[in-house]
Every structure is written in C-alpha cells, then in structure tokens.
Image (cartoon, rainbow, N blue to C red):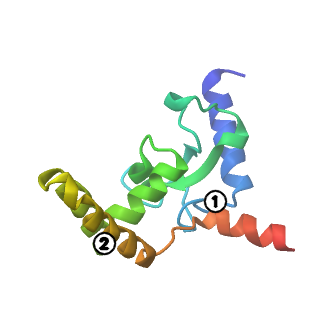
Amino acid sequence: MNNTKTKRALRLRIFERDEWLCWFCGIKTEPPVDAGNPISATVDHFLPGSKGGSNEESNLVTACKRCNSRKRNRTIEEYRAYLRYSLNDLGRAILLLQAGMALIPESHHHLIQETIDQLEVELPPITFYGEYVSQLSQAE
C-alpha cells in the first residue's frame, strides 16, 4: 500500500472512530470534499508534531475545519486558554489588564493582579466535546 493510501485509510479510521464528530465543538463533520466548507472533516493532533506529537491514532482526533484552523499549532491546553481569553469580552479585558501592568509602577501590580484574579473566577470554563463524551463514558 502506498503512503497516500495509508494516510487516507488512517484518516478514515479516525473519522469513523470519532463518528465524524468534531472532538472540539461536537459538530457533525462532512467528508473533506469541499476545501472551503468550515465543517469539513480534518484530522488534528492532540499534541502537535512540532511539539513532539506522533501520528499514532491515540494522538489524532476528528476536527471540523473551523476548529482545526483556530487551534493551529497549539496544544489542547494552549487552545483552551486561547478560546477562554480571546473569544470572550471578559477574557479580552483580562489580557488588556495584564498588558497594562507593564505601563504602571511595579508597586501597583498587586492591585491589577487582584482585579485579574477576581475576573478570572467569572470566566466560563472550556470543556471540549470529546472531553465531555469521555467523562460520560467513564461515569457509566
């Protein structure tokens, strides 16, 4: 079997294993025919190859094109932090406060940090669909 057929077979196994559901958002993906379709199925790495991740099935999941594009080269925890802080008004405010700490005297940093700590409690947690499904199956 040549390399292209091997990769295609692996991708299909991943899609079928995950029931064509995006591990991140849970949307039912579609076969990767239309490159511009945001719900086209793609295969993503839990741990990116550039960060030591392998192409083993245990490191691969189905992802819709939209989630895979957003995740980029991030680990799961880096992606979770990205979503938590960049796609939420409160998260963006926290990032601005953190950046603003460089502009104020160090003696006042504790005041800003207290505000950040209080705001972070209000940030919603991010649980990916695949984590939720895994938690359900472990509870059974």
Q: Is residue 32 visible?
A: no
Occupied quadrant, residue 108: bottom left
Answer with left or right where residue 13 lies relative to residue 101. Answer: right
Q: Residue at x 44, y 50 (%)?
A: 71
Occupied quadrant, residue 7: top right
Answer with left or right where residue 35 lies relative to residue 6. Answer: left
Residue 115 is labelled as: 2
Q: Residue at x 36, y 74 (%)?
A: 119
Give the mark nearer the N terminus: 1 vs 2: 1
Q: Disc 1 marks which amino acid? A: Trp
Which residue is outermost to the top? 2
Q: How far from the left and from the top, in percent, is residue 113?
A: 32, 64
Q: How many marks?
A: 2
Evaluate if marks 1 and 2 touch, with contact meaning CB atoms under 8 Å apart.
no
Q: Nearer the viewer, residue 63 or 123?
A: 123
Q: Is residue 19 visible?
A: yes
Which residue is outermost to the right? 140
Answer with left or right where residue 91 lies relative to residue 4. Answer: left
Q: Which residue is mark 1?
A: 20
Spatial CA span between label 1 and label 2 = 42 Å
Quadrant (top left, top right, bottom left, bottom right) of the N terminus:
top right
Q: How busy is the neighbourhood of tag 2: few (under 14 within 10 Å), some, or many (20 plus)?
A: few
Q: How far from the left and from the top, in percent, is residue 99?
A: 21, 54
At mark 2, the secondary structure is helix
Relative to 57, is 109 above or below?
A: below
Relative to 53, is 129 above or below?
A: below
Which residue is outermost to the left? 103
Q: Nearer the viewer, residue 56 or 127?
A: 127
Quadrant (top left, top right, bottom left, bottom right) of the C terminus:
bottom right
Q: How busy is the neighbourhood of tag 1: few (under 14 within 10 Å), some, or many (20 plus)?
A: many
